[in-house]
Image: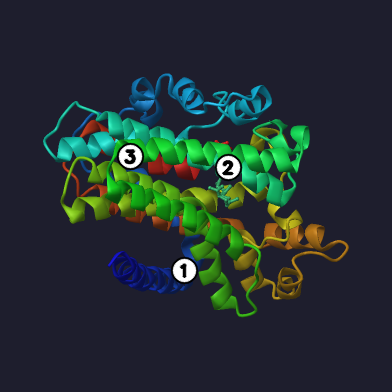
Amino acid sequence: MLQLIVTKYMKCYKRFFYCNFFFFQRNIKRRNRCLYTTPPVCCSICSDAKLKDPFSLAQKDLQNLYEEIKKQLLVSKAELKVLCDYYFDGKGKAFRPMIVILMARACNVHSNKEGVLLPAQRSIAMISEMIHTASLVHDDVIDDSDTRRGKNTINKVWGERKAILAGDFILSAASMALARIGNNTVVSVLSQVIEDLVRGEFMQLGSKENENERFKHYLEKTFKKTASLIANSCKAVSILVNSDPEVHEIAYQYGRNVGIAFQLVDDILDFTSCANLLGKPSAADLKLGLATGPVLFACQQFPELHAMIMRRFSSDGDVDRAWQYVLKSDGVEQTNYLAQHYCQEAIRQISRLRPSTERDALIQLTELVLRRDK
Ligand code: GRG
């Protein structure tokens, strides 16, 4: 039965995904000449509620989040405990828990449960940050990264084996916290995230010869690696307060679209931001052999990039040459335009909820996603 539901859901998702993709491709051809004329997405806010900064609005609910996470990481072995706690130092943006809190409160208002954040909804905020962190720890092993958030990675300080075990431990603590919520649907929704993270990471290991296939592959990977966690965490908090599947879908689609936009901006920052600000080396994606949005768009203008993409920038000078092509092209602007498209869709979705300060903060958040510089 579950298999049937998942298959049906995937079919729906695929249809939606391809529709979106081809819609965008058509649009981008039409708008190629007027990329800078798109109005800022914040113009679409359509409620009277007073605007509040999303981070300060969620701050009170997020107080002590990291302390509580560390309490979940019950390890008797002192060294493992140090590794597990390493990234829960308040240096991350806490972007996922913030969205989850705002979505929970927006759904609560929509469902006439004003003012009350359910403890289970707050747990989802905590669990989403734990899953995110576990995936970062494993990702740094896969990429052999030396720095993250401006400090040495766990794999760099303690070695790969211990880093993998620390990631596993954080994930197991997150799974136990999830089980304690005691809602099977929510367990299944967040388990999907772990599958998507692994599949997304796997997709990143492969390349596609055909250009259209390559773009589809990139967007699907982007959903799985980054957006699935945000989408499904948003869905989980909506399930906890409302039984209407339409509300779950709004929450999911908001998270999905914001999540994809977030990753597209991340891919842009790899070209435009300096290493100091990012806390990791810039051009890191090219160095890892990855062709992200800016390169894929640049390849439409400079077909010379095709061969480099296929050999994953592995020949001498590839990284520098590809970098130059991207900067000469409008790949960054096109990727930014694509991110705007996803943010507009996120706004369209969330605007279907009843007005609330939190709903409007989620709308405002799309602008912060597009403007962020780290
Ligand atoms: C162990 C759950 C698990 C998964 C294994 C390694 C892997 C499969 C997946 C990697 C997923 C991954 C690291 C995606 C990158 C997502 C991303 C954009 C990270 C950066 O997020 P920020 O900018 O980071 O929010 P901070 O540091 O602010 O938390």
* Residue at the image point whose x is 35% and y is 43% from the top: 42
Q: Nearer the viewer, mark 2 or mark 3?
A: 2
Give the x, y percent position of residue 2: 30, 64
Q: Nearer the viewer, mark 3 or mark 1?
A: 3
Say what amino acid the circle numbered 2 marks. Asp
Query: Within 8 Å: ligand 1 and the Cβ of disc 2?
Result: yes
Query: From the image, which quarter does the C terminus lie in?
Result: top right
Q: Which mark is residue 351?
A: none
Query: Within 8 Å: ligand 1 and the Cβ of disc 1?
Result: no
Q: Which mark is residue 362?
A: 3
Say what amino acid the circle numbered 3 marks. Leu
Q: Which residue is mark 1?
A: 28
212 left or right of 22 in image: right
Q: Quadrant of ligand 1?
A: top right
Q: Residues within 10 Å of mark 1 (few under 14, many from 20)?
A: some
173 left or right of 291 in image: left
Residue projecting furthest to the left: 112
Which quarter of the picture shows residue 319? bottom right
Q: Which residue is mark 2?
A: 168
Quote the CA–CA distance across marks 2 and 1: 42 Å
